[in-house]
C-alpha cells in the first residue's frame, strides 16, 4: 500500500488507486491513513465527516463507507483480506500496515536525521537530509481533501514540521556559504509568508552577503510594516539587531553563521 498525504491525497495498492472520489469516504480514508496504524474512534470519524451536526444515520453511514473502502481494497488486491487492511477495533477503525509506504513517514524519518545532523553541527549532512525530506512535498498536505477539524489539525502539524525543516535547512546552508543559491527560493518563501521573521532574517542575510545591502534593508522595512499593521508587533530583538548590523556593515555578517532563531508569525 502506497500512501501519499504530502500534497494530493492518494492511496494505491499494487499500483491501483483506491482513493474514493466521493468527499466523505475520501475524508474517512484520509483520516485513517494519516493516523498511521492507530485506531480512530468512531466518534472522531463522525466529528470529522459532520463537524457541525451529525445526522442520526451517521453510524450507519460510516459503516457503509468502511464497507465501500474494503470493496476497493478487495478489487485492487484480491489476495488481501480487506477486513485486515481496514480493521474494526473496539470503538473505531484502523488502517493496518500491509507492506505500506507513506510519504509522511518518510518525511518524518529524513527530517529527524536532518535535525540530528544540525544539532551535531554537521551542516552538510543536515542540508542533504532536509532537502531529501522537503522534496517529498508536492503541495499543501491533503490538498484535494475537504478537511474537517481533525484533518485540519493534522494538516497544520505537518505544515509546521515542513516549515521547521525548511528553516533549519536554510540556516545550515547559509552556514555553508550558499547564499547565492538560496536567494531565489528565499524571495519566494518570504513573499508567501510576510510575517515570518526567521525567513526574512535569512533573506536579509543572504542579500547582504551577495552585496545587496539596500535590498536587505528594504526586506526589513517590509517585514516591520507587515508586523506592525497586521499584528501590532515590532520585529524581534534578534531581527532588529540584524538590521543594525547591516546598517553598520558589521564584518561579522560575512562570517559563516546564521541569522538566529527568531520565529514569530501569524
Image (cartoon, helix red, strand yellow):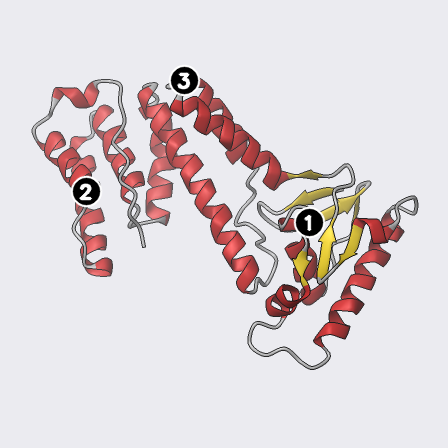
Question: In the drawing, does residue 197 fall left or right of residue 12?
Answer: left
Q: Is residue 42 above or below residue 251?
A: below
Question: In the drawing, does residue 72 fall left or right of residue 232?
Answer: right
Quick one: label 2 or label 1, which is nearer the N terminus?
1
Per the image, label 1 sits on a secondary structure element best described as strand
In the image shown, does 205 or 31 lie closer to the viewer?
A: 31
Check contact, mark 2 vs mark 3: CB within 8 A.
no
In the image shown, does 103 or 202 lie closer to the viewer?
A: 103
Question: Where does the image place residue 30, in percent across and percent down from the top left?
Answer: 66, 55
- Give residue 65's quadrant in the image: bottom right
Per the image, label 3 sits on a secondary structure element best described as loop
Quick one: label 2 or label 3, which is nearer the N terminus?
3
Question: Where does the image place residue 172, in percent across and percent down from the top left?
Answer: 37, 25
Q: Label 1 crowding class (10 Å Cα cut-off): few <14, some 14-19, many 20+? A: many
Quarter of the image where the C terminus is located = bottom left
Residue on which the image places disc 2: 220
Q: How many marks?
A: 3
Residue on which the image places disc 3: 122
Q: Label 2 crowding class (10 Å Cα cut-off): few <14, some 14-19, many 20+? A: many
Residue reaching furthest left? Answer: 248
Give the label, 2 or 1, closer to the camera. 1
Q: In this view, does 154 lie above or below 106?
A: below
- Give residue 70's quadrant in the image: bottom right
Q: Is residue 209 above or below residue 25?
A: above
Per the image, label 2 sits on a secondary structure element best described as helix
Residue on which the image places disc 1: 10
Question: Where does the image place residue 242, in percent across and percent down from the top left?
Answer: 17, 34
Which residue is painted at 56% across and 43% down in the image? 138
Which residue is painted at 53% across and 46% down in the image? 139
Which residue is painted at 44% across and 35% down in the image? 165
Amino acid at each position: 500500500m502506497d500512501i501519499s498525504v504530502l500534497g494530493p491525497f492518494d492511496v494505491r495498492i499494487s499500483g491501483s488507486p483506491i482513493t474514493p472520489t466521493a468527499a466523505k469516504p475520501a475524508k474517512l480514508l484520509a483520516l485513517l491513513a494519516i493516523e498511521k496504524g492507530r485506531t480512530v474512534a468512531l466518534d472522531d470519524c463522525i466529528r470529522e465527516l459532520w463537524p457541525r451536526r451529525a445526522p442520526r444515520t451517521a453510524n450507519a453511514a460510516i459503516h457503509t463507507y468502511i464497507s465501500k473502502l474494503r470493496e476497493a481494497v478487495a478489487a485492487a488486491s484480491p489476495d488481501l483480506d480487506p477486513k485486515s487492511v481496514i480493521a474494526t477495533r473496539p470503538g473505531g477503525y484502523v488502517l493496518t500496515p500491509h507492506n505500506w509506504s507513506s510519504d509522511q513517514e518518510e518525511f518524518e524519518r529524513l527530517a529527524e536525521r536532518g535535525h540530528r545532523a544540525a544539532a551535531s553541527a554537521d551542516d552538510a549532512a543536515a542540508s542533504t537530509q532536509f532537502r531529501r525530506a522537503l522534496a517529498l512535498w508536492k503541495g499543501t498536505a491533503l490538498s484535494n481533501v475537504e478537511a474537517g477539524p481533525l484533518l485540519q489539525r493534522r494538516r497544520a502539524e505537518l505544515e509546521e514540521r515542513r516549515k521547521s525543516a525548511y528553516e533549519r535547512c536554510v540556516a545550515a546552508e547559509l552556514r555553508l556559504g550558499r547564499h547565492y543559491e538560496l536567494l531565489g527560493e528565499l524571495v519566494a518563501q518570504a513573499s508567501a509568508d510576510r510575517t515570518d521573521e526567521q525567513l526574512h532574517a535569512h533573506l536579509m542575510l543572504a542579500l547582504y552577503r551577495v552585496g545587496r545591502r539596500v535590498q536587505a534593508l528594504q526586506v526589513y522595512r517590509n517585514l516591520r510594516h507587515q508586523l506592525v499593521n497586521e499584528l501590532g508587533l515590532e520585529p524581534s530583538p534578534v531581527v532588529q539587531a540584524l538590521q543594525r548590523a547591516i546598517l553598520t556593515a558589521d564584518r561579522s555578517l560575512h562570517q559563516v553563521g546564521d541569522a538566529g532563531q527568531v520565529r514569530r508569525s501569524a
